Image (cartoon, rainbow, N blue to C red):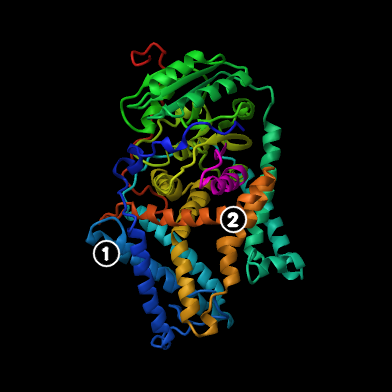
């Protein structure tokens, strides 16, 4: 890992044409989310009051919108929560009055239909075998259905990028599913056994809400499954990489008003080139900077000892345009994308390129560590270790890795040119391109040994702008690659990972309203049957993420990061808040897109044309 930066991080310019994704997002007032939560609280209070006074007991004996027979109890009145959330979100969504009314009807009616199916299933089960579903199981399925409906309808009614067909090659589906099945079976056996044993450790963890209040169950199953997949990923990387592999690389650095950091960025690339040993060319893509970015870049490149480089002016604003122009100028068989505010480690090129000894490797990334010392750096440190240092390697061995962080990633040039250009006018172009390379049949992975310093916002305003873009990108990438989700051909990324990412984004947008709802129900409801089981709720919201984070930190051999777990809780709360705000930036239309399994939902853009061969460096725009 490179040393901490010595520049002034507060000079970072975080507003650009990508902030509003070419018209696919609207500015959102900082008062809009608080107003939504106040409205949500009012709507939820009214419904809970009706249930508490018994006005609805004749129809819904569970104090929730559940009809038919049931067994047991549930932790929270999830259907009341979902309806309250749908109505309040629709009131404050970005769109006309008509569009918001139609959004509300679409959300509520679809959710009502799914819940009716669940309840009818319980009625049928009771009629045939005399035992209905447990209420807890029905409500868990109703909660998952609510998240799915929200994500589905946002893509259906939101302003999204036009879908572009995903070119597909041979996929290792059998091997990936085999690995997942074995890991899942072993995890299930251990989780079931642990749930039946009086294990003191689990009892203590449940008491402090690190595992579910009822039993370790699902939480332990997920933890064990990913732990096994991570071990397989490390073994596979060791087996397929070759320490002596090296080949010429072209490094592309898109830059917009980066004079405060571009010099250090280039110096770190030069040191990495000296360590690497093979030829390295550097192309700084000056994307319309109005400061001294280009002049500083030229001066520092001239002083470099291990690389040769140049500065290319790109007049069209937007990172994707700068990247596409850089690919055209790149001359070597491997293309490295590095952000202008990223300081690579001395061994990053050496370690990452070892993975390309495998001819099936198409894209390799690393772990973007924070510089340290600023308000959000501790929380961000745990976030990147968990996501990129742990879960990403695990997903790669089951052909499920969707995105590689674009701060530092190496592409096989042939694969990159086959999938066409980086998408402009959307958020998440780095995830989109990695997804398409993987679907061609290439292996994509994050090498946890490759760590570099990447900028982390130092103010709430900067963090807000960044996270609104990042969380919105889940919808944009899923919409642009919707053929993977809707087409009949099976793809692990299209049928499992992308839907999970959408539901997880919906879940995170609901987290703060859910906490508010749980508190309301706790203090208002008098019947014990409706009281939330706070051990289970806290375990899901806080406990299990902390356990997963601790496992990821130790697996990545960074024990000092355990000290960052308390700020990580606060950081996760901020992420939930910004995820809710991010959904509010998506323009909602009065028209809906009909999505059917087995066909693509929107009029399709043609498949991307492969990029042409690199142009010679004597282009008139090269200086």
Which stretch did the figure color magenta? 367-391
Pointer 1: what residue?
Answer: 101
Viewer-nearest of discs 1 and 2:
2
Q: CA distance from mark 1 to mark 2?
A: 41 Å
Q: Quadrant of the N terminus?
A: top right
Question: Where is residue 621 shown, x and y percent of the image?
Answer: 34, 16
Residue situated in front as seen by the camera: 466 or 2: 2
- Which residue occupies the foreground of this view, 364 or 380? 380
| Residue farthest top in this picture | 618
Secondary-structure class at tag 2: helix
| Neighbourhood count class around disc 1 (C-alpha, 10 Å): few under 14, some 14–19, many 20 upward | some
Which element type, helix, strand or loop, lies under badge 1?
A: helix
Question: Magenta region, mostly helix, strand or loop?
Answer: helix
Question: For mark 2, what is the residue?
Answer: 566
- Identified at 39% across, 74% down, the residue is 44
Q: Indicate the quadrant where residue 327 lies.
A: top left
Tag 2 or tag 1, which sits nearer the N-term?
1
Would you say 243 lies left or right of 467 here? right
Q: Label 2 near label 1: C-beta < 8 Å? A: no
The residue lying at 41 percent from left, 85 percent from top is 59
């Amino acid at each position: 890992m490179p040393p901490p930066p010595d520049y002034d991080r507060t000079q970072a310019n975080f507003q650009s044409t990508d902030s509003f994704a070419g018209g696919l997002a609207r500015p959102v007032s900082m008062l809009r989310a608080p107003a939504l939560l106040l409205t949500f609280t009012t709507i939820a209070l009214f419904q809970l009051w009706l249930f508490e006074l018994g006005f609805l007991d004749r129809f819904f004996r569970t104090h929730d919108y559940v009809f038919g027979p049931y067994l047991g109890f549930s932790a929270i009145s999830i259907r009341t929560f979902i309806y309250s959330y749908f109505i309040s979100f629709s009131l404050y969504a970005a769109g006309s009055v008509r569009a918001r009314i139609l959004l509300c009807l679409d959300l509520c009616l679809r959710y009502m239909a799914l819940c009716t199916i669940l309840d009818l299933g319980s009625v049928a089960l009771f009629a045939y075998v005399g035992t209905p579903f447990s209420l807890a199981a029905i409500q868990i399925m109703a909660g998952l259905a609510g998240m799915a409906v929200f994500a589905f309808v946002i893509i259906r009614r939101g302003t999204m990028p036009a879908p572009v067909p995903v070119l597909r090659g041979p996929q290792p589906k059998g091997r990936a599913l085999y690995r997942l099945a074995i890991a899942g079976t072993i995890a299930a056996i251990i989780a079931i056994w642990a749930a039946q044993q009086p294990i003191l450790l689990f009892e203590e963890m449940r008491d402090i809400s690190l595992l579910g209040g009822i039993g370790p169950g699902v939480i332990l199953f997920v933890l064990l499954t990913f732990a096994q997949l991570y071990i397989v990923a490390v073994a596979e990387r060791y087996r397929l990489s070759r320490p002596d592999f090296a080949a010429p690389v072209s490094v592309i650095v898109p830059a917009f008003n980066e004079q405060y950091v571009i010099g250090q960025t280039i110096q770190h690339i030069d040191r990495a080139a000296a360590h690497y040993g093979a030829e390295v060319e550097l192309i700084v893509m000056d994307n319309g900077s109005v400061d001294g970015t280009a002049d500083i870049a030229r001066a520092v490149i001239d002083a470099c000892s291990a690389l040769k480089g140049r500065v290319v002016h790109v007049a069209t604003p937007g990172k994707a345009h700068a990247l596409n122009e850089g690919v055209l100028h790149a001359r070597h068989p491997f293309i490295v994308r590095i952000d202008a505010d990223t300081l690579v480690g001395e061994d990053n090129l050496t370690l990452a390129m070892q993975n390309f000894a495998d001819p099936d490797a198409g894209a390799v990334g690393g772990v973007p560590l924070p510089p340290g010392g600023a308000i959000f750096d501790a929380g961000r440190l745990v976030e990147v270790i968990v996501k990129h240092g742990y879960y990403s390697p695990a997903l790669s061995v089951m052909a499920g890795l969707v995105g590689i962080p674009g701060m530092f990633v190496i592409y096989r040039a042939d694969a990159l040119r086959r999938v066409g250009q980086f998408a402009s006018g959307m958020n998440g172009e780095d995830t989109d391109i990695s997804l398409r390379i993987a679907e061609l049949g290439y292996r994509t992975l994050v090498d946890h040994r490759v760590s570099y310093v990447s900028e982390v916002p130092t103010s709430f305003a900067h963090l807000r702008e960044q996270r609104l873009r990042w969380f919105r990108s889940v919808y944009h990438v899923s919409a642009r690659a919707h053929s993977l989700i809707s087409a009949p051909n099976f793809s692990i990324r299209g049928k499992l990972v992308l839907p999970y990412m959408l539901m997880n984004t919906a879940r995170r947008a609901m987290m703060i309203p859910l906490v508010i709802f749980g508190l309301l129900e706790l203090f208002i409801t008098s019947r014990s049957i409706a009281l939330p089981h706070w051990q289970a709720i806290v375990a899901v919201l806080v406990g299990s993420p902390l356990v997963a984070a601790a496992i990821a930190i130790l697996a990545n051999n960074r024990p000092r990061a355990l000290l960052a777990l308390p700020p990580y809780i606060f950081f996760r709360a901020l992420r939930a808040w910004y995820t809710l705000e991010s959904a509010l930036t998506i323009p909602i239309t009065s028209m809906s897109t009909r999505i059917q399994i087995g066909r693509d939902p929107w009029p399709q853009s043609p498949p991307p044309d492969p990029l042409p061969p690199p142009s010679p460096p004597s282009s008139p725009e090269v200086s």
